[in-house]
Amino acid sequence: MHSLPIFLNLEGRPVILIGDGEAAAAKRRLLERAGADIIDENGSAAIAIVALDDDAAATDAVARLRARGILVNATDRPALCDFTLPAIVDRDPVLIAIGTGGRSAGLGKVLRQRIEALLPATLGRLADALFAARPAIRKRWPDAADRRRAIDDGLAGAIDPLDDDAAANVDAWLAGDVGPETGLATIRLRSADPDDLTIGEARLLGRADRLYHDADIPSAILDRARADAVRILGAATGGEAGLSIRVEWA
């Protein structure tokens, strides 16, 4: 991982913007959407964006800002950037950021467009509904592990985030006589490439509490599971040929 993705709360906070023209205007619109207070170079801020066409002027501006301890993004100049600005899928309050490390803004844009086509416009309402239901969810499933599994089960069914009506179904999901599911499944790997996992297999890895695997399972595959899922090294195939992982949730 070449950088750490983070989400900054810029509401009412100063951000330096240097430049004019189309590139600077685009960055200004983005910062305004995030609620930032846009200021010039003479002001005090923790981060800055340099959107200058001239290479020498951009390099000098970055050097001046860095000398003041300010983190800088330089438009179209990844070598000068302390941080990059991702392509954004906005389903407020759900945000999906797509970064390419400054390699290709075009690639980030196409990926954003494809993900946007998959996600309903109502996705943000589901996030708000789940947040509003937190007291009721905690009351119904006091145990944290039970609660997490119940939410996982709900998101895989009654309140599937890809369903336009998911937010409206939250109350019915809470009222239903459904408890956290338990289960055990085996994932037969077709290759060491995590991109070869089906959506269903990726979901199994994501919900697993325990993973049983042999030492030759690639870490790229295991990393698709939750960080807190227990990894248990040992035979996962029961003697069958090929790479596989047993996943257990309970």
Image (spheres, rainbow, N blue to C red):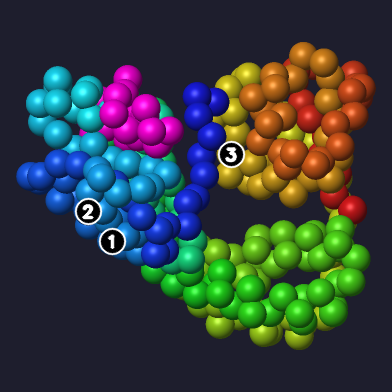
Viewport quadrant of the N terminus: top right
Label located before the other in sequence (3 or 1): 1
Which of the 4 quarters of the picture holds residue 136?
Answer: bottom right
Q: Which residue is mark 2?
A: 28
Is disc 2 surrounded by few (<14), some (14 to 19) or many (20+) residues within 10 Å?
Answer: many
Residue at 58 percent across and 39 percent down: it is 198
Q: Is residue 158 above or below residue 209?
A: below
Q: Amino acid at mark 3?
A: Thr
Q: Amino acid at mark 2?
A: Arg
Residue 41 colored in magenta in the image: no
Q: Which residue is mark 1?
A: 32
Can residue 122 be seen by looking at this rendering?
yes
Q: Which residues are magenta?
A: 63-81
Q: Which residue is mark 3?
A: 198
Q: Are marks 1 and 2 in contact (CB under 8 Å)?
A: yes
Which of the 4 quarters of the picture holds residue 202?
Answer: top right
Mark seen at residue 242 = none
Rendered location of residue 76, percent (x, y)? 22, 29
Rendered location of residue 85, percent (x, y)? 35, 41
